[in-house]
Image (cartoon, grey):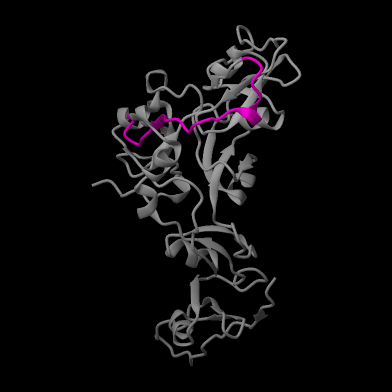
């Protein structure tokens, strides 16, 4: 925490004359960061000293001039649909200065540490997913997943998770991964989910070129994989990288390699990997509405509301929506 020197208000005294106007100088808090002082002076006096005036009637206290991390998100990069955490400029300033710069203030005394301004998926306690910073997610009471840049459909919604030891439980995609299970996003309940273990493990080639050993061919296919010959171990499997379904900000879908999808500003979809089985209109992103406000809704809902979708991976915290005409 920075140590600030609080200086008593400076009031300009003027002789009182009968019938004269009140010439009392209006003062406010003035932050002088070079000398680490807070003065209560008139606005022009503050400006003359190179300070930041906080407004008429504001007063100096222990925190009013303490800076915090201010994230300056690149709206141009965001509107292009480029997904994922990216280096975002962070400057230590007071909250009012951050707002005037178009930034998002992370809190008084919060330092500009590595990753302070990175954004990723945040699962909200009331359900749903939003893209925000780690501090923003914590303020919302959510769970932050720094390795997951996007809110892909079903990421924070529980679905069937086939456990390695057999059986099924409802879990979100990250929870299922933590259990070492197979996440089935198209099975909202365990009823009907084929999680029965068979007597033989099956090497399963996944679209990203990796290999997992599943209990049955059914589980492999449910994960979007290709079962290998019975008895084949992953160590002996030669798994090629395959194209997957890629959703774009306009709601369209194309089949391509995952890395090409990300580079083109799209969102690689979890199983199933066929565009015919994927609803890209369900992807949640920031939407600038006609009244100038921002809402995190699906592409289809954004279009129905007459809004402008801001790109895959976008979040309202990083979007500057234009005012209504």
Front residue of this view, candidates 67 and 22: 67
Q: Is residue 316 visible?
A: yes
Return the residue found at the far top.
192
| Picture quarter with the N terminus | bottom right
In magenta, the rendered stretch is 230-252
**21 to the left or right of 104:** left
Residue 109 vs 300, above or below: the answer is below
Q: Based on the displayed image, in which of its 4 quarters is residue 168 positioned?
A: top right
Query: Could you tell me which residue is drawn at 60 percent across and 29 percent down?
Result: 211
Coordinates of residue 297 in the picture (x, y in percent): 43, 33
Coordinates of residue 187 in the picture (x, y in percent): 56, 15
Return the residue found at the far left.
325
Coordinates of residue 155 in the picture (x, y in percent): 56, 30
Residue 156 vs 187, above or below: the answer is below
Query: Could you tell me which residue is drawn at 60 percent across and 46 percent down?
Result: 146
Coordinates of residue 251 in the picture (x, y in percent): 34, 30
**320 to the left or right of 128:** left
* Residue 103 lies within the magenta run: no
Q: Based on the displayed image, in which of its 4 quarters is residue 160 positioned?
A: top right
Dominant secondary structure of the magenta stretch?
A: loop
* Residue 237 lies within the magenta run: yes
Q: Based on the displayed image, in which of its 4 quarters is residue 253 positioned?
A: top left
Query: Could you tell me which residue is drawn at 45 percent across and 56 percent down?
Result: 73
């Amino acid at each position: 925490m920075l140590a600030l020197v609080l200086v008593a208000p400076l009031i300009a005294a003027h002789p009182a004359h009968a019938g004269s106007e009140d010439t009392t100088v209006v003062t406010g808090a003035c932050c002088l960061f070079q000398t680490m002082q807070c003065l209560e002076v008139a606005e022009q006096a503050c400006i003359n000293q190179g300070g930041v005036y906080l407004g008429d009637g504001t007063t100096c206290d222990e925190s009013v001039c303490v800076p915090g991390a201010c994230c300056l998100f690149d709206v141009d990069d965001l509107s292009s649909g480029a997904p994922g955490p990216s280096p975002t400029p962070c400057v230590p300033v007071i909250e009012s200065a951050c707002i005037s710069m178009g930034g998002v203030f992370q809190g008084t005394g919060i330092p500009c540490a590595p990753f302070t301004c990175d954004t990723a998926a945040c699962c909200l306690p009331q359900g749903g997913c939003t893209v925000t910073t780690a501090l923003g997610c914590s303020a919302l009471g959510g769970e932050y997943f720094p390795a997951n840049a996007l809110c892909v459909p079903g990421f924070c919604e529980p679905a069937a998770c086939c456990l390695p030891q057999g059986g099924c439980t409802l879990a979100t995609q990250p929870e299922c991964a933590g259990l070492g299970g197979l996440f089935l996003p198209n099975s909202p309940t365990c009823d009907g989910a084929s999680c029965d273990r068979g007597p033989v493990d099956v090497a399963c080639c996944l679209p990203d070129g990796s290999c997992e050993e599943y209990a049955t061919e059914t589980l492999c296919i449910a994960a979007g994989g290709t079962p290998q010959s019975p008895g084949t171990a992953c160590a002996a499997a030669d798994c090629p990288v395959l194209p997957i379904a890629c959703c774009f900000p306009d709601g369209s879908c194309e089949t391509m390699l995952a890395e090409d999808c990300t580079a083109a500003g799209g969102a690689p979809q979890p199983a199933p990997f066929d565009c015919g089985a994927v609803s890209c209109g369900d992807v949640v992103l920031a939407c600038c509405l006609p009244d100038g406000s921002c809402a995190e809704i699906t592409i289809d809902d954004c279009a129905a509301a007459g809004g402008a979708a801001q790109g895959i991976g976008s979040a309202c915290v990083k979007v500057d929506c234009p005012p209504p005409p």
